[in-house]
Image (tube, helix red, strand yellow):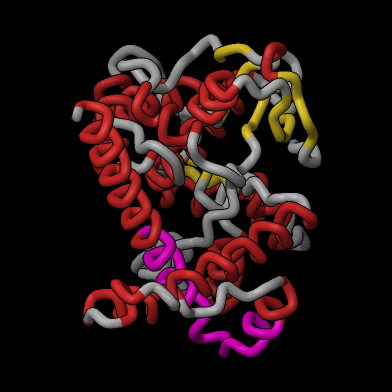
Amino acid sequence: MFSKVVEVAVADLRLCDSPLRAGGENAGHVRLLAEANGLPPIVVDRATMGVIDGVHRWRAAQARGQERLPAVFFEGDPAEAFVLAVRLNTAHGLPLSLADRKAAVERILRTHPQWSDRAIAGVSGVSDKTVAAARRRLSADSPQPTGRVARNGVWHRTDRVRGRARAVELWAADPGASVRAIAAKAGISVTTAKDIRQRLRKGQDPLRLRPRPLAEPADTSISRLAPAPAAATAAKAESVEELRRLRKDPSLRFTDSGRTLLRWLDAPAGDDTDWTTLIANIPSHAVASVAKLARQRAHDWQHLARLLEQRAHQELESQNAS
C-alpha cells in the first residue's frame, strides 16, 4: 500500500479533492513548520499526486522555497485514501476539530458501513457512542449491512443469535465441516464457531450467548504507516540526541515537574529486537491487558503532543502579533 520514502517535486503536488478541515489551512502552523527541521515525509496519492497527509508540511516547503520534499506514495481508491488521511491527521500534527472529525465519521459510514462503531471511532478520534449516533441518523436514509467488520478485520453478524443459528444449520447439513469454514459462511468468529461445536457435542444449547470479553481486540484492521529502515534509524538517533539535550537543560533538571517529565521521556522506546524479546516473554494471560495499556499510553502521549503543539502555536502567534 505504501512505497519507500522518495523525493517528490513540491510543484507537482496538489490538494486532495476532499479536504479534511472545513476551516482550511492554518497559516500559523505553516509558519511554525517552516522553521522546523527533520519533519516526517508527507503521504501522497500516487494516482493523483494529492497530499493525503502533510498539507501544512507541503505549504511550509513552499514558503521556504524548497524544490523537493520527502514523501511516501499511497496506492488505493479515494475512499481508502480518505480513511488514511483521517487516521493520520487524528494521530499526529495539528489536531482536527471535533466538527471535522464528526464530518469524517459520516463520510466513512457512507463508504464503509460494514465497519464497526469501534473501528470507525479508532480511526476518527471520537467515541464509539458518537459513531453510533451518526449511524442512527444515517440509517433512515440508507439500508444498513447485516454485519460489521471488527477492528481485527473480521466480519461479524450484527445479530449474534442469527449467526449462531446459521452455524448450527450448516453443521447439521455438513457435520464434518471445519470450524473455519463454518465461521466464514455464518459470519461469526472462529472462537464462536468452536464454542458452538463444543456445545453441540455436549448436548448444550448452542444459541445461548456468553458475556462479551472485556479485553478489546487488537487494532490491526488498518495498515500502519511504517517508516523505511533508514528513516527509522535516523529518527531514533535524533530522538536520543534530543533527549540528551533535555537532560542537560537546567530548567528541567532542577525542577520537580522537569524531573518528572524527564523520567517519563527516559523510558526506552525499543527497537525491533527489543519488541520481539519483550512480546515473546509476556505471559499469555497478560497479553490483552498489556496491549490495552499500551494503547492507552499511546493515546496519552498523543494528547500531550497536541497540547504542546497548541502551546507552540499560541506562542508563535503572540510573537508575530508583538
Q: In which quarter of the image is the N terminus?
A: top right
Is residue 106 a member of the stretch shown in magenta? no
Residue 168 shows up from this direction: no
Residue under the point 37% across and 22% down: 27
Vertical order, 131 against 79 (above or below): below
Residue 156 shows up from this direction: yes
Q: In which image quadrant can residue 276 be found? A: bottom right
Give the farthest residue toward the front. Answer: 322
The total of numbered circles placed on residues is 0
- Measured from the top left, where is residue 74 in percent x and y? 71, 30
- Measured from the top left, where is residue 78 in percent x and y? 61, 18
Q: Which of 115 and 184 is in front in this view?
A: 115
Relative side of 68 to 25, left or right: right
Q: Which of 19 and 312 is in front in this view?
A: 312
- Measured from the top left, where is residue 265 in percent x and y? 43, 73
- Measured from the top left, where is residue 264 in percent x and y? 38, 76
Is residue 293 a member of the stretch shown in magenta? yes
